[in-house]
Image (spheres, helix red, strand yellow):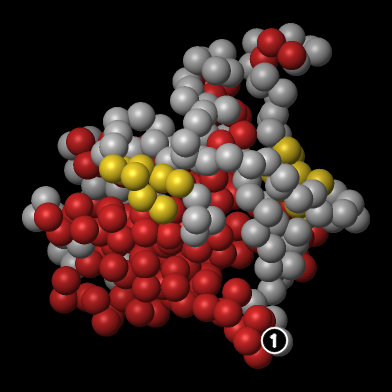
Amino acid sequence: MADNQGRVGGIDDFGGPEAWFRSQPIVTRTWFALSLILTCAGNFGVINIMSLVYNWTSISSKFELWRFLTPFCYVGKFDLSTVFGLYMLVNFSKQYEAGPHNTGAGGGTADYIFALLFGIVCMLFTYSIFAYNYIMPLFTRNLTFYVLYIWSKRYPTLDANIWGFPIKALWLPFAYLALTVLMGNPFWDVVHGIAVGHLYYYLVDVVPLVYGKDVLQTPQFLIDYFGVGEYVPPVPAANNARNTGFAAPGNVNAPTDPARRNTGGGGYNWGGGGRSLGSN
């Protein structure tokens, strides 16, 4: 395992599952919780899965607005791929949310929320292009690989490995895509996520550099609410002065504070099972 700065902490690192959950960045924590709840509810029959999918007719005629969000939070039926999907969601999301990637809020949570909103809107608009390749319009894997792709463009030369094979971070999304194809699994959701991720990368990084224009900026209301800079991790239970037995919740800098930059080095560890990212 790598150091704490470059990996998702183990369940026991913060004193148990609940404390581990509290230790995650706020967006990652919320996305994971919603995905876990909706996936379990759908599989146990508490919620009809068809009520979670994207359906414009139901949204426009029945005002079922939750369908804008729930397709990005249902992972799939109970099997190994669903477990791994939740694992990737937490890993990829935390690494990007904790980074300094800036579209107006100094990096961190506010910028990450804006990136996710951009991805969600673009996927809903472009779904019709890929519609015939989908069994159901569910986009959790799309959004997960969208996050992985834009992360990989931030750290293209970082050493990575997948199933023990060394690879640069730039090629990691395509390595997952190749594995998906070789295993005979549906792959258009991965393609869709990568395509939207490239659009985001082009607008955020290429256009300002080539044309000198900032096309995408984090809205001020997100900055006002979530602050600027990187997410500040919570204090582990052992170091919590109140000694409550759980980690204190984290936060971000106030909007008036200067953005904190991520100066940490080294690789990122994406967990075990042959899918570790980083050289530590």
As helix, strand or loop, the secondary structure at mark 1 comes to loop
**In the image, residue 19 above or below residue 75:** above
Residue 257: x and y in percent read 89, 52
Residue 146 in picture, x, y percent from top left: 42, 62
Amino acid on which disc 1 is placed: Lys
Position of 195 with respect to 222 (left or right) is left
233 on left or right of 77: right
In this rendered view, identify the residue nearer to me: 159 or 163.
159
Q: Nearer the viewer, residue 40 or 58?
A: 40
Q: Quadrant of residue 86?
A: top left
Question: Can residue 226 be seen?
Answer: yes
The picture places residue 148, in percent across and down from the top left corner, at 43, 55
In percent of width and height, residue 211 lies at 65, 90
**Near-viewer residue (63 or 127):** 127
Q: Is residue 150 above or below residue 237?
A: below
Read off the residue under disc 1: 213
